[in-house]
Structures are given as structure tokens and as C-alpha cells.
Amino acid sequence: MASSTINSIREHVPEIATEDQEHRPVAIDIRELSRRYNDQPAVRELSLQIQSGEVFGLLGHNGAGKTTTIRLLTGLIAPDSGSSRVLGMDSMTHGADIRARTGVLTETPALDSRLTGRENLQFFADFFDIDPSRARQRIDFLIDAFDLNERESDRVGSYSRGMHQRLALARAMLHEPELLLLDEPTPGLDPIATRIVHLMIRAFRSEGGTVLLCTHNLEEAERLCDRVAVLERGQLIAIGNPRELTSRIVDQQIEIEIAPRYRDRARTAIIGAVPGVTVAAAENLVRVDGVPRERIPDLVQALAGAGIPVYRVTPRVSSLEDVYFALHEDGRAS
């Protein structure tokens, strides 16, 4: 059942053309937004823009300010200073209108454990005043899409954590929102269920929807997000697309193939050319950690100048995880 569901969703996800983000309308506009709890800053002077049709990741440790940001955007709490506009509306004066056009998935989604899965979706369809015929179509589609068919008539209190999370995401998408605000959508899900969620996010984006994805899962963010922002203690410390951040923030690790007899000479030449790097050698391979990308040509030139034949230079492909830990360990900001 799950594999057929995945294939069915995939068939309806067209190839997404790359567009210049700057030419899209702004879906979320945050200006100098701040909020404190008990004199502790939760969000500090946060400013960023998210374009329509974008999957935007908000990354950070617990307490970094991700959930508070969602509450501010939906008008559930008031900022101490600054402002935010969502779908063109001020979050504080039009919170109810924003929530009507937005699908929100929190870490503790509000589902009634006494009702069945289908009854929960029907309750929210009535709440959003969805036309009964359209509501039936949406409920049928989402129950199938999230692979809940076999348990739709069971009470939600008997659901596993993964099923509970899938139903919560189905509920967030029930009223065909323009914007999804997802706070950790995949914890507790098995790999197949996680793939279903990822495909649904891509399908939503391909239809013009916008997604703000708060996640601890850096691989998930790298796979899904057009851009990401990294928060630390409520403050923005980096923003950009994952590849851009990797090239800007993470020093390169490279592997160089040489003849074994040149190992010691190679180590001396590398350290002389690029001080501060770490060099490890074994057999015919020399690994260099911490070399800035722009200094790699200098390193190769130094080896050639020392009379060392270079057979291969292979860069290690850095990930968003490398960026994240480089930012938090080294304290570097954008």
C-alpha cells in the first residue's frame, strides 16, 4: 500500500523549474522581530523574507526560537518589538485570517484521541466550513496519500506516533492552504512514511504553495529546502541555499593521490603553502582538512613546485550538517 501511495504522489509532482527567488512575491516578511520569555530572549531582531513557492528551512537547537517564530507569524503571541507580515497581512491584526489560509503542524498537534482518523478530519473540515462534497474528496485523498486507509475508522488514541503525525499533517493540508508552517513534521516516522511526507511537501510546492519547515533533521532540510536560515538563541546567524552556505562557511577537505615515497615531502609542501591545515597521510593518499576552497590551487601548485607528481585531487562533498556544526562550534555568522 505504501509503495503504491508513493508512486501515486510522485506521478503528480512535476519537475520544478529553477526560478530567481527575487522575482517571486513575498509570502513571509519579518522585520526586526523580537520576543522574550521571563527576560530570556526567544527571538532576537529576526529579519528575513520568504518568497511564494519556496520551501524554506528554519534550523536550530531546541530553544533556538523556531517554534516561537511560528507563533509570532500566526498571531498567537505578540512580539516585544518588530513586525511580521504573512500573505500580505499583519500577523498581529489579522492573525485569524492568516490561520485560515495557513496549515500549521506543531510538535504537539491538536487531535481528538476519542475520534477516529476520518472523524478528526471531518471535524476540521466543518471548522473550516469546507463544502461537504469537497470535504469528502479532500478527506479521501489525504487518507489515501498518507496511507491511513486501514486505520481510518479506528480511534486516534490507538494510533502509533508515526500515524498520529501523518494524520496531523493531513489535517494541516485539509483546507488547501497557501502556506504550510511545519514544526518538526517527521520525528517518529519510519523511512517510508517520511518519504510520503517529503513527497507531499514537494507536491504542495509544485502547485505554488509555500513551506516554512522547522527541523532538526539536517539531511531533510538539505533534501527539501530551497534556502535555510540557522538560528542560535533566537538570533539569525546564517541564511542562504545549502550549496551556497557550504562553499562560504565550510573549509574544504581534499584527498590527494601521490606516490608513497613523496608523503613526507608532500606534508611539508602543503603546510608551507597553506598554514593551519591538518595533514594526514597513509600509503599513497594524503588527506588535507581545513583548506579554504580558494587556496586549493595554491596547494596543488606547491606540490608541483616541490617536484611531487599529483595523480588525483578529490574534494570531499560537504553537507548542510557540516555548515551547521561549523557555525555553532566556531561561532561564525553570515
Image: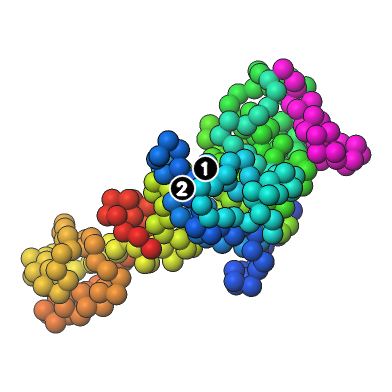
Point 32% across, 50% down: residue? 328
User: In the picture provided, is 254 more to the left or to the right than 22?
Assistant: left
Residue 108 position within the rendered picture, expressed as x and y whole percent measured from the top left: 58, 30
Q: Is residue 264 visible?
A: yes
In the image, which disc is placed on residue 54? none
* Residue type highlighted by circle 1: Thr
The image quadrant where one finds the N terminus is: top right
Way the structure is coloured:
rainbow
Q: Is residue 5 visible?
A: no
| Residues in magenta, as a range | 114-140
Q: Quadrant of residue 22?
A: bottom right
Q: Which residue is mark 1?
A: 68
Seen from the viewer's position, the closer of residues 177 and 28 is: 28
Dot 2: few (<14), some (14–19), or many (≥20) neighbours within 10 Å?
many
Whether residues under marks 1 and 2 lie with C-beta atoms below 8 angstroms apart, the answer is yes
Dot 1: few (<14), some (14–19), or many (≥20) neighbours within 10 Å?
some
Q: Which residue is mark 2?
A: 43
Point 85% across, 38% down: residue? 129
User: In the picture provided, is 155 more to the left or to the right than 57?
Assistant: right
